[in-house]
Amino acid sequence: MLCSWHTITGELSKGSELICPSVYSTMLHSPSNPSGTALILFLIILISRAASRDILPLRSSFSVEELQSNVLQSPDGTFSCGFYSIYANAFTFSIWYSNSAQKTIIWSANRDRPVHSRRSMLTLQKDGSMVLTDYDGTVVWHADGVGARYAHLLDTGNLVLEGTSGNILWQSFDSPTDTLVPTQPVTATTKLVSATQLHVSGHYIFRFSDMSILSLIYNDPDVSDIYWPNPDAPFFENSRRRYNNTRLGVLDYLGQFVSSDFAVQQALVASDAGPGIKRRLTLDPDGNLRIYSLNSTDGSWSVSMVVMPVSCKIHGFCGPNGICHYSPVPSCSCLPGYKMVHPGDWSQGCTAIVNTTCGAAQPVRFLKLPNTDFWGNDQQILESISFQACKDICTSDCTCKGFLYVQGIGLCFQKSLLFSGRSYPSSDPRMMYIKLPVSVNISNMSIPQSNVLDSSPNVLKCDDTAQESYSYFQMIV
């Protein structure tokens, strides 16, 4: 081998050197060889870049044991890249804002599969592929960059594998996690996925729908539905274009997020719009999409735009069998007869205290919930039907969890899931009824009712009992 990279693992930040004495000596003393001179210039440039902290050369590695020194930094210092500790013995290979107080992550290679502390490594192999291995050598993540000469962290926050001519063979911008930074696009093939409190992928997705509309979606094995833009409104009311072949959205440096399906002159704009502020667009664990602006003095973030100002309209906000209400901030409660699955984590929702089982005779009754609805999950919608008939259908169907009935027009919505529950002040003649086993003791059970969505206190009446902000339920035997 005429020349080779010499890099000591764990010492990359101190520089790398290219060892090729025979080639250098031959070309240095052959001025008549212009191609050799060009190669020397290329090697000098490459050596200079390899010694900088924004470059990872071939056959170089980062190790978890040296995470403090094994860090790439973009030329302007805005972004850093390396191993990030999420727990005592769990690490992700990530990119973060260097000057944020909490090392705010914008991308992770292995969010759902962290590596352990000892002997875990990120290596740029000799063929140009980037490989992340765990302590036992198991490949956790892989980026195909065959032909790449080095990895480069750009000022945009994009980690790229570059070829000899500077062509990009792979880039982190093509596989976002839960955040977009300025100039990073969301496309027909990319998406944001929220993180949970445990730092793994959550249920919320930001992507272009099958109808090419940029959407917020709740997605799990049982439920998948769009909650932004309003799925019940037509295109023109949502200010969206029906025909959108481009499918491209991007946050610019002025704090404006624009998408090819947005109507003319429509954008999601940060409240502090203008140049000179570092920002990010993040799909948060609660399912809301927000633009954050960085305070350059103390490294803190502030919300400068929020897509869903009414959080209770976010599907799954309180999980299965939970109800979202305002008191006055968005809060969650379990339905009567239910309890939290995991205290402190409303994304898991609530589970029945006493389960109903199909195939076994089990007496049931219904609990009346005023000013409450569970959006979607309609097993069937029946028109011009009496209340008693609507109730009887749900009673006889063990998969029916409850029903919504609209007095006056006889609309009956049979619910297969009690999901996306929301309490709202309303004079609407609709009423929600949930099915419970007779054995469940519901005496004096109550649930908060939202009363801040209009200017007057919400005094709810039920069963001749009136109480501000709280409603007691009426049993239907």
Image (cartoon, rainbow, N blue to C red):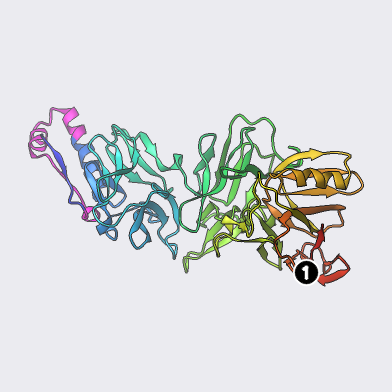
Q: Residue at x 75, y 70 (%)?
A: 444
Which class describes the residues within 10 Å of circle 1: few (<14), some (14-19), or many (20+)?
A: many
Pick the residue in front: 146 or 209: 209
Image coordinates of residue 302 in percent, x first then y, are 56, 63
- Residue 44 picture quarter: top left
Image quarter where the C terminus lies is bottom right
In magenta stretch: residue 30: yes
The span shown in magenta is: 10-39
Image quarter where the N terminus lies is top left
What amino acid is labelled 1 in the image? Ser
Determine whether 443 is above or below 21 in the image: below
In magenta stretch: residue 360: no
Helix, strand, or loop for circle 1? loop
- Residue 65 picture quarter: bottom left
Q: Residue at x 74, y 53 (%)?
A: 363
Is 399 situated left or right of 473 in this image?
A: left
Image coordinates of residue 254 in percent, x first then y, are 57, 51
